[in-house]
């Protein structure tokens, strides 16, 4: 990251977060999340569904759920600083998604949009998150996960992002390259374990929809008995 980019982002901000703010505005992210929720069928869930978003960050996914009319929404994230930026009506909790602060069988659905690939230890941390979801969700509880996946499209993007001229010509590409660099360890670890991730996921959840497109893994399913 350049000094000017750091200064524009503000003092003390995490470099990955600073890059993400250059990649898209909060409103762009909320619109993206809203369209994604519609496309993956979440918009058809009953509006009284109690939905928990894990790794919710500054809460743009919670804003998207609210725009769709969901009334019982909660967010969990490890960072109190990010949660403090959220301005909506959802209840937000600072906590570890590997040890959720909820009672057994107390929630209807859980959503993760881009948080699982930040887990440090795979597959162990993924097992812990999914075991907690199975504990917290009611029988046949719903889940939706969207995470990066090494599709052909993402391979091409990675190749282009390695070229300095291409990065100088595109703010988004420069920001993406900075994000990858600042999360390289967990990002590459996640992308390099597709079979393990799939096996763990299917051990805990029955898929109703699964697709791999535009560098993303989209999974919608229900808790296995």
Image (spheres, helix red, strand yellow):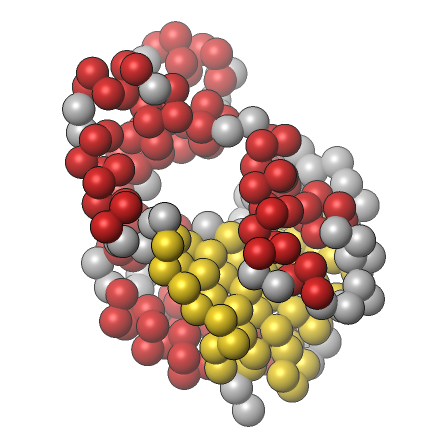
Q: Quadrant of the C terminus?
A: bottom right
In screen coordinates, is 52 left or right of 78?
Answer: right
Closer-to-camera residue (154/72): 154
Residue 62 x %, y %: 68, 48
Question: Residue at the spot x=71%, y=56% of the render?
Answer: 74
Counting from the top left corner in percent of width and height, residue 58 is at 61, 39
Residue 97 in sight in this render? no
Residue sitting at x 62%, y 63%: 41
Relative to residue 63, is residue 58 drawn left or right? left
Q: Image check: 83 left or right of 188?
A: right
**Residue 178 placed where, x, y %?**
32, 28
**Depth check, front residue: 46 or 84:** 46
- Is residue 69 left or right of 151 when viewed as pictured? right
In this rendering, does residue 163 appear at all?
A: yes
Residue placed most toward the observer, 194 or 54: 194
Name above or below for residue 95 compared with residue 140.
above
């Amino acid at each position: 990251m350049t000094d000017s980019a750091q200064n524009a982002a503000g003092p003390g901000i995490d470099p990955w977060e600073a890059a993400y703010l250059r990649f898209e505005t909060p409103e762009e992210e909320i619109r993206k999340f809203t369209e994604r929720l519609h496309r993956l069928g979440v918009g058809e869930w009953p509006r009284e569904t109690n939905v928990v978003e894990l790794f919710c960050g500054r809460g743009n996914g919670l804003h998207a759920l609210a725009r769709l009319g969901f009334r019982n929404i909660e967010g969990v994230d490890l960072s109190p600083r990010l949660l403090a930026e959220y301005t909506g009506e959802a209840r937000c909790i600072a906590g570890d998604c590997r040890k959720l602060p909820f009672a057994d069988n107390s929630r209807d659905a859980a959503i993760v949009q881009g948080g699982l690939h930040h887990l440090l230890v795979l597959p162990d941390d993924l097992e812990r998150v999914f075991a907690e979801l199975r504990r917290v969700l009611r029988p046949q509880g719903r889940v939706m996960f969207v995470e990066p996946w090494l599709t052909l499209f993402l391979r091409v993007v990675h190749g282009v992002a390695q070229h300095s001229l291409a990065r100088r010509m595109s703010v988004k590409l420069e920001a993406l390259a900075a994000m990858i660099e600042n999360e390289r360890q967990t990002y590459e670890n996640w992308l390099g374990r597709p079979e393990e991730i799939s096996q763990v996921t299917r051990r805990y959840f029955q898929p109703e929809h699964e697709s791999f497109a535009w560098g993303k893994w989209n999974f919608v399913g229900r808790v296995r008995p």
